[in-house]
Image (cartoon, rainbow, N blue to C red):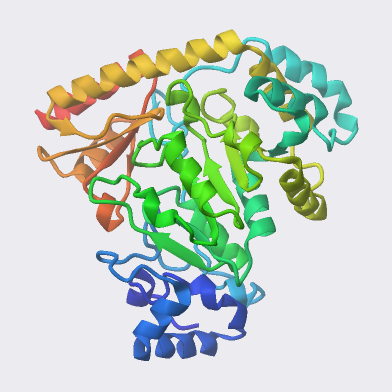
Amino acid sequence: MKRLTNKTAGHALWQRGYYDHIIRSPDDYNTIWHYIDTNPAKWAQDTRYVTDFPDPVRQPGCCTNKEVTQMSRYFTKTLAALEPYTPGEQLKLPDLVKLNANENPYPPAPGVAAAVAGAVPGLRLYSDLTEAALCAAIARHCGVQPENILCGNGSDENLLLALRAFCDETHPLAFADITYSFYPVLCDLLHIPQHVILVEEDFSLDLSKYHGLNETIVIANPNAPTTLLQPVAAIEEVVRTNPDSIVIVDEAYIDFAGPNASCVPLTKKYDNVIVVQTFSKSHNLAGARVGFCVANPELIADMNRIKFSYSPYNVNSLSQAAAVAAMEDENYFRDTVGKICATRADTMAKLRERGFTGPDSATNFLFVTTSRMPCKQIFERLRQKGVLIRYFSAPRLSDYLRITIGTPEQMQRFFEELDLILG
């Protein structure tokens, strides 16, 4: 297969997913490349690609450009150029300060361990494929009914179920150019064309660009990695102006955004909105892999049809038990979220004292830049000291760092090492 070099990094294969359904051999890629090179205007119209993207990259947002990894001769050619999602490093080192994956720095709720232990005897049986107890607990927490809930193996699976149900090769997914980088990966995997919409110079979303698209839309709110929150009223206008298309609101970090920030109430008013949340962040269960979505029962039934077609027992018994216990301990939930928000404010103030700038965060992480030293160099030197943060090499992000909020003790260590680096 032709080596994917500069064309991968450039715009030519950025929207490759649009053509995947006609690729049958390596030669087809050459045909497509020739078509793109000789018909740039037509190609831009075909894919609805944003042609003014500055210094285009293979994927938007957080993904770094990499060549396609080695694969066996048996791997399907239709996915030969698939580039997987790149998660934060998961190093196992003593005294590591891990501020790179937006995990919760506090342990799960006190009742989680006992709940998991209590579920062990039942492991000889399949898990409850209706996830009834978990759906009921989530429904109480969100103020909806159990039939409005679908659980998944992390929120990523709920996103996959939604995209598989409500997108196809003729129905694109619209999303921002700087946002959660799993969206284009799912599009590539599922052969969904992508409509990429530029964020503004200050990284904000102009949601008027999403009005009347008649395409499935996904909006991360608050957005990652930019930390910015859109008001519910602005998202409601997107929902209202796309009555015949699904609008997915990805609320992985919503619990750190303050009161009345969630779009869950919109699911009671509109039949075309899906709100996706997770237990990984504010409920301290990243390792349990539990997510959920809220929508009207008809949409839940559509996604269940997909779920039961490929992974009926998608949330295991131990994770279900852990999630129920975590969701029911509202006091612990509010306490840990409050601690993280307080540490977030303190951390941002201290960074600004050191010459860093960035938006006020509505998440459990910060998105900052500085002119004192190249951000990549700060990232690399902190890593050498056992402090992991996140750096992205994509052009619009290469001057920024993403810093997860840890415990006060972890942030103290971060600043000690940062001060030594900055002098």
Q: Where does residue 159 sit, x and y in percent of width and height?
A: 61, 48
Q: Where does residue 364 sit, x and y in percent of width and height?
A: 41, 27
Camera-side residue of 328 and 231: 231
Residue 186 sits in which quadrant? bottom right
Q: Residue at x 57, y 23 (%)?
A: 283
Q: Where does residue 381 sit, x and y in percent of width and height?
A: 23, 37
115 lies above or below 251: above
Camera-side residue of 151 and 258: 258
Q: Where does residue 355 sit, x and y in percent of width and height?
A: 12, 30
378 lies above or below 5: above
110 lies above or below 386: above
Residue 51 sits in which quadrant? bottom left
Viewport quadrant of the C terminus? top left
Q: Can residue 84 be seen in this view?
A: no
Camera-side residue of 222 and 319: 222
Residue 134 sits in which quadrant? top right
Name the side, left or right, on which 422 lies relative to 192.
left
Q: Can residue 93 be seen in this view?
A: yes
Camera-side residue of 163 and 104: 163
Name the side, left or right, on which 263 lies relative to 418.
right
Q: Residue at x 76, y 46 (%)?
A: 298
